[in-house]
Image: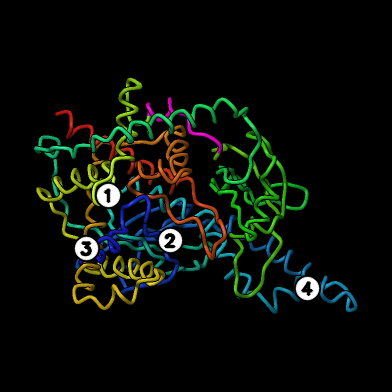
C-alpha cells in the first residue's frame, strides 16, 4: 500500500510532477449559455446558472482576422505555385476558391495560440470569481462582420471565506540532524558560487531558457498584425528533435532582434491540412542560464536575511523522511492545515478530468499494471485528484485576495530553480509541461507568470504560519 501511495503522489512533487497542458483545445461538456458578444478584442464572462460554469469570450476584430487571412492566403498560393512550376503561378483567386475553409481553420488555430490564450489567462487573473481546473475551448463563432469569437469555459468552486487562515495553529516539520546534510548544503552553495563567478553574461546555450517576443511579419520583416506580439518562453533542449530551436537561439544575446522562418517557430501554424512557412520578427528579452543559480536572488525570493537562513532553507531539500523532503513535508502540512479548516467543494466534473490527467501520467510508468491491480487504486486516484485541486484552489484564492504579483526577477528565479534536480525540490507547483513528443515547445509568459505567483504565495503562506 505504501508503494501505491508513493507512486500516486505525483500531483505536487517537484520531482514527480504531473504535467497539464493548458488548455486542451477541444470542446467538452454541455452547452452553457452563450456569451454576450462585444466588438473589439475583449474578454467577458457569464456564469451558467445551474452548473457553476464560467464562460469567457475573446473577440478578435475583423481587421486582425482579415490581415492574417490575406497573408496566409498569399503564402498558400506561393506554395502551390512552387509545387506546380510547369503550370505557372497559381492565382490567389484560385487558391481561395479551392482552400478557403482550410485556410480559415488554419487562421483560427493561429489566433488561438498567438492572441486568444494570453487574453484568456489575463481575464482569468482579473476575474472576480475564481475558476478551478483547466479551462477548455467550448466553441468558435465567425461573426457576420468578420470578427471571430472564441468561447472558453471552466468551472468554479463554491465561494469560501478564509480571512483567518493566518491565525491557524501550525508546527512545521523539523529537519534531520545529520552532519552530512550540512556538508551537502555547503558543497551545493560552493558549487553554485563557482559557477556564478565563471559565468560572464554569455549568449544563449544548451539548457538555457529564453524569453522572446514573436511578431508575425512578411519576408521584409514588416509586421502583418499591428501591435500583436506573443510573449513566450522556450527551453533550448539537448535532444535531436530540438535542433531547430538550438540553431535559432544559441549564440543570441538579450536585446538582439532578427527575422526568421525557422521550423521551431511554426507552432502557431499547426494544421492538419497544410503547413506554411510563416516569417517572424524575434526579439530576445531574457535568458535564464542553466550554468548557475544566483544565491542572492534566492535569498530575496524567500525573504531570507542571512547566509544562515539560506543554509537552513537549502537543508530542507537535503533532509528526507520516508523519501519525502522536509520542504515538501512543510508545504503539504501548511496546505493541509488550511484545507482542513476551510475545505473548498470541487465540482465533480473537474475531479473527473483531473483523475484522467493522473491516469494518463501513471499509464506511462513501468509499474502501472501493478498499481492498477490494487483494490484501492481507483479510490487513491480520486483522493489525489481532489487533493491537487483543493491545494491549487486555496493558494489561488489567497493570491487573489492579496492581489499578488510576480516581477520579472521572480519569474527568472522560478525558472532557475527548475534547472537543477535538487533545487527543483524547492518548487511545489511545477511549470506547465513544455515538452510535446520529447520536443521543447513554447510556453506563454502570462501562463508562466501565473504559476510563479502561485509558488510565491505558497512561500508567503508558510512564512506567515511559521512566524505568527
As drawn, the residue found furthest toward the front would be 179
Tell me residue 219's x, y (percent).
77, 52
Mark toward the start of the polypeptide (1 vs 2): 2
Earlier sequence position, callout 4 versus callout 1: 4
Mark nearest the camera among 1 and 2 is 1
Judging by the rendered image, the residue that carries numbered circle 4 is 80
Q: CA distance from mark 4 to mark 3?
A: 60 Å
Q: Give the residue at the far right of this rendering.
A: 86
Give the mark nearest the N terminus, 1 or 3: 3
**Real-space Cα distance between discs 4 and 1?**
58 Å
- Which mark lies nearer to you, 4 or 3? 3
Q: Quadrant of the C terminus?
A: top left
Mark 4 falls on what kind of element?
Answer: helix
Mark 3 nearby-residue class (10 Å; few <14, some 14–19, many ≥20) = few
| 166 over 341 or under it: above or below | above
Give the labeled residue for mark 1: 324
**Quarter of the image holding residue 114?**
bottom right
Q: Earlier in the sequence, mark 3 or mark 2?
A: 3
The residue closer to the viewer here, 248 or 156, is: 248
Q: Is residue 160 left or right of residue 202?
A: left
Element type at marker 3?
Answer: helix
* Residue 2 tag number: 3
Amino acid at each position: 500500500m505504501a508503494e501505491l501511495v508513493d507512486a500516486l503522489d505525483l500531483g505536487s512533487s517537484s520531482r514527480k510532477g504531473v504535467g497539464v497542458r493548458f488548455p486542451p483545445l477541444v470542446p467538452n461538456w454541455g452547452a452553457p449559455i452563450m456569451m454576450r458578444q462585444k466588438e473589439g478584442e475583449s474578454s467577458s464572462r457569464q456564469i451558467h446558472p445551474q452548473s457553476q460554469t464560467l464562460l469567457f469570450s475573446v473577440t478578435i476584430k475583423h481587421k486582425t482576422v482579415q490581415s492574417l487571412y490575406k497573408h496566409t492566403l498569399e503564402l498558400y498560393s506561393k506554395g502551390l505555385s512552387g509545387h506546380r512550376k510547369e503550370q505557372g503561378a497559381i492565382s490567389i483567386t484560385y487558391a481561395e476558391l479551392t482552400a478557403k475553409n482550410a485556410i480559415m481553420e488554419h487562421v483560427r488555430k493561429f489566433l488561438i495560440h498567438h492572441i486568444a490564450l494570453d487574453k484568456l489567462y489575463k481575464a482569468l487573473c482579473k476575474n472576480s470569481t475564481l475558476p478551478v481546473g483547466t479551462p477548455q475551448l467550448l466553441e468558435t463563432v465567425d461573426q457576420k462582420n468578420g470578427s471571430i469569437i472564441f468561447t472558453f469555459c471552466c468551472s468554479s468552486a463554491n465561494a469560501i471565506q478564509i480571512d483567518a487562515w493566518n491565525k491557524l495553529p501550525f508546527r512545521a516539520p523539523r529537519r534531520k540532524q545529520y552532519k552530512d546534510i550540512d556538508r551537502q548544503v555547503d558543497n551545493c552553495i560552493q558549487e553554485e558560487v563557482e559557477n556564478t563567478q565563471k559565468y560572464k553574461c554569455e549568449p544563449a546555450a544548451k539548457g538555457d531558457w529564453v524569453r522572446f517576443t514573436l511578431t508575425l511579419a512578411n519576408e521584409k520583416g514588416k509586421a502583418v498584425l499591428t501591435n500583436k506580439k506573443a510573449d513566450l518562453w522556450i527551453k533550448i533542449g539537448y535532444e535531436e528533435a530540438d535542433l531547430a530551436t538550438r540553431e535559432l537561439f544559441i549564440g543570441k544575446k538579450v536585446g538582439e532582434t532578427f527575422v526568421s522562418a525557422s521550423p521551431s517557430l511554426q507552432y502557431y501554424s499547426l494544421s492538419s491540412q497544410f503547413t506554411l512557412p510563416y516569417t517572424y520578427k524575434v526579439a530576445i528579452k531574457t535568458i535564464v542560464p542553466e550554468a548557475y543559480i544566483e544565491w542572492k536572488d534566492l535569498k530575496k525570493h524567500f525573504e531570507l536575511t542571512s547566509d544562515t537562513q539560506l543554509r537552513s532553507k537549502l537543508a530542507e531539500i537535503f533532509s528526507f523522511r520516508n523519501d519525502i523532503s522536509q520542504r515538501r513535508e512543510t508545504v503539504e502540512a501548511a496546505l493541509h492545515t488550511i484545507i482542513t479548516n476551510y475545505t473548498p467543494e470541487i465540482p465533480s466534473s473537474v475531479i473527473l478530468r483531473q483523475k484522467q490527467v493522473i491516469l494518463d501520467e501513471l499509464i506511462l510508468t513501468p509499474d502501472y499494471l501493478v498499481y492498477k491491480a490494487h483494490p484501492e487504486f481507483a479510490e487513491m486516484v480520486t483522493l489525489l485528484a481532489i487533493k491537487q485541486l483543493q491545494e491549487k484552489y486555496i493558494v489561488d484564492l489567497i493570491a487573489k485576495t492579496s492581489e499578488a504579483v510576480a516581477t520579472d526577477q521572480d519569474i527568472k528565479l522560478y525558472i532557475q530553480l527548475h534547472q537543477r534536480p535538487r533545487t527543483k525540490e524547492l518548487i511545489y507547483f511545477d511549470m506547465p509541461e513544455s515538452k510535446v513528443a520529447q520536443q521543447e515547445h513554447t510556453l506563454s509568459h502570462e501562463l508562466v507568470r501565473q504559476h510563479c505567483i502561485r509558488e510565491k504565495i505558497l512561500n508567503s503562506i508558510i512564512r506567515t504560519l511559521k512566524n505568527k
